[in-house]
Image: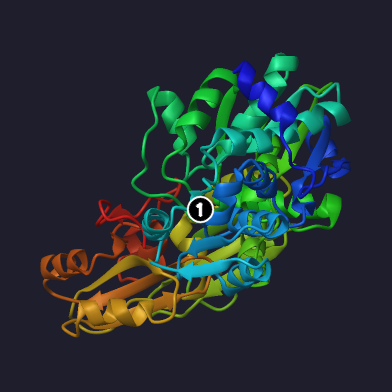
């Protein structure tokens, strides 16, 4: 790794990238009881660290290679880094992006002078197209993370951190393919091996964590796309070896914890980072640090559409431990809600309340209540228990947070059986119609909920009336779309079906039953 360390020292990044500030984070520091700093890569010209590695790789091309141009496959930050770097060096650039890429990102890449090719509904399809164009043109492929010169370019962040904060004790780094983590760790550990390097991944995109546990690179069948900047199914060969040798540990955080970290960074900087850019801060927020620690969180990027802020805001309170989302039963009679508030809510604020009348003696209510801490949350739930309120804590139930709280209604009338599913499809014009066309008209749709998440994948809760469930699920498998049954989901059973009376559980929510796990996400 001596050569890799030398490559970081010789990296040529500052013609395109800037030395970003290391900003103190007073509120995060107070929260963790240690000194916390934010490495502001969101302030780069393309609002992401990716410009460093892209420029360092492209500037090293020979004269002949420059004439043939460069090709990259990316749906976001790497695309912009390659496009800007190539433009500055007068090199033709072609960027292959999935058709699902938000227009704001496509326009940004075109604005840097690159030719954009829209192909496929996923990164894998865009990557395959890029490799074919590469074969035809003889251009140079610029890998987003698994290239020694790209890794060296990202490693200049580690060099800056040591220069800006010589007494640093912990560095938290977002992890996707591993280029940023590899570059920082191989440089820092050569000079200050006592500094603890912690990688942070989303819990549903933890390719590096699982690879380290397996002792070899593993390929995930599916990755979550909330933090789309790190949604990588397999880490790089070069990056894995560096991480295995130099990184102390890799931890994971939930979607809610990422949202809470976006808010925390905003409160300290008044800047909004993207979900991937908040991973390191989320890692700090869930890690116990020594009181004398000087911890750095790398804020890796800020390329997020404005429309996505609503989704982030909805998840922030639960992610910070300041809200409990609970389903409860109360008598279906006048004054029951007032009695509930008087007995339980007290000084707590109700953050959301969802209810719809159904015949019967018991009402099912989905309620959000603000709490001051996880201990306060436990006290509140224990008080519900003591007062005899049947309840289920849905704070960790993804179906409740994504769909059910927006569609409280009860069971479908009639004698025909209803079956509820979650379907994922590529977020592009016509995708939903394509799915329904593939499915056919045999079954009546009895429930439907969709929200635009400003992401590359749509998420629909859909109900079908079908007496022959086996035939329905056989047809769902034939569509090629990823889906899962919501049979047994506590929030679905309580609020959307006729099974509500037997659905109470004082545990956590359960995961949907996978229906077609072998099919990769659209």
Residue 60: x percent and y percent?
A: 64, 40
Can residue 227 be seen at all in this image of the molecule?
Answer: no
Q: Could you tell me which quadrant the N terminus lies in?
A: top right
Identity of the residue drawn at 82% across and 35% down? 36
> Within the image, what quadrant is residue 207 found in?
top left
Q: Is residue 162 above or below residue 48?
A: above
Q: Is residue 487 above or below residue 164?
A: below
Residue 9: x percent and y percent?
A: 74, 27
Identity of the residue drawn at 52% across and 65% down? 455
Q: Is residue 334 above or below residue 154?
A: below
Residue 369: x percent and y percent?
A: 65, 59
Q: Nearer the viewer, residue 494 or 302?
A: 302
Colouring used for the render? rainbow
Q: Which residue is mark 1?
A: 388
Residue 259: x percent and y percent?
A: 65, 54
Q: Is residue 204 above or below residue 489?
A: above
> Within the image, what quadrant is residue 468 found in?
bottom left
Secondary element at image label 1:
loop
Q: Nearer the viewer, residue 282 or 250?
A: 250
**Side (left or right) of 283 relative to 14:** left
Q: Nearer the viewer, residue 204 or 504?
A: 204
**Side (left or right) of 4 relative to 452:** right
């Amino acid at each position: 790794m001596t050569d890799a360390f030398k490559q970081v020292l010789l990296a040529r990044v500052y013609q395109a990238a800037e030395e970003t500030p290391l900003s103190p984070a007073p509120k995060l520091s107070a929260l963790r009881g240690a000194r916390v700093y934010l490495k502001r890569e969101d302030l780069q010209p393309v609002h992401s660290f990716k410009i460093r590695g892209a420029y360092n790789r492209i500037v090293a091309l020979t004269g002949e290679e420059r004439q043939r141009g460069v090709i990259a496959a990316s749906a976001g930050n790497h695309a912009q880094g390659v496009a800007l770097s190539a433009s500055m060096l007068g090199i033709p650039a072609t960027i292959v992006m999935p058709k699902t890429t938000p227009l704001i990102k496509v326009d940004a890449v075109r604005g840097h002078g690159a030719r954009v090719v829209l192909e496929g509904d996923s990164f894998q399809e865009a990557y395959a197209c890029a490799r074919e164009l590469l074969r035809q043109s003889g251009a140079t492929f610029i890998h987003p993370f698994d290239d020694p010169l790209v890794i060296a370019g990202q490693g200049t962040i580690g060099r800056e951190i040591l220069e800006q904060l010589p007494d640093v004790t912990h560095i938290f780094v977002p992890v996707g393919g591993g280029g940023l983590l590899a570059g920082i760790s191989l440089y820092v550990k050569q000079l200050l091996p006592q500094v603890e390097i912690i990688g942070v991944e989303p819990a549903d995109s933890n390719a590096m964590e699982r690879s380290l546990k397996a002792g070899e690179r593993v390929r995930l069948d599916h990755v979550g796309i909330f933090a789309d900047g790190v949604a990588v199914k397999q880490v790089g060969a070069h990056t894995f070896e560096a991480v295995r040798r130099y990184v102390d540990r890799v931890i994971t955080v939930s979607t809610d914890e990422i949202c809470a970290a976006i808010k925390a960074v905003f409160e300290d900087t008044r800047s909004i980072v993207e979900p991937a850019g908040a991973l390191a801060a989320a890692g700090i927020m869930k890690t116990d640090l020594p009181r004398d620690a000087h911890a750095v969180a790398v804020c890796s990027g800020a390329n997020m559409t404005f429309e996505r802020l609503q989704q982030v805001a909805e998840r922030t309170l639960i992610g910070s431990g300041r809200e409990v989302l609970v389903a409860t039963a109360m008598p279906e009679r006048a004054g029951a809600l007032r009695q509930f508030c008087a007995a339980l809510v007290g000084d707590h604020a109700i953050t959301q309340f969802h209810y719809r009348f159904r015949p019967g003696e018991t009402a099912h209510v989905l309620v959000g209540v603000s709490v001051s801490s996880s201990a306060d949350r436990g006290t509140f739930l224990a008080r519900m228990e003591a007062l005899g309120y049947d309840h289920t804590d849905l704070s960790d139930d993804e179906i409740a947070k994504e769909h059910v709280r927006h569609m409280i209604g009860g069971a479908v009338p009639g004698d025909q059986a209803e079956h509820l599913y979650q379907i994922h499809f590529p977020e592009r014009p016509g995708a939903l119609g394509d799915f329904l066309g593939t499915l056919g008209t045999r079954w009546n749709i009895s429930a439907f909920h969709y929200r635009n998440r400003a992401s590359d994948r749509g998420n629909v809760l859909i109900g079908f009336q079908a007496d022959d469930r086996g035939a329905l699920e056989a047809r769902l498998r034939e569509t090629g779309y990823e889906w899962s049954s919501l049979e047994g989901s506590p929030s679905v059973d309580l609020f959307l079906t006729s099974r509500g009376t037997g659905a109470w559980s004082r545990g956590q929510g359960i995961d949907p039953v996978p229906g077609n796990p072998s099919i990769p996400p659209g």
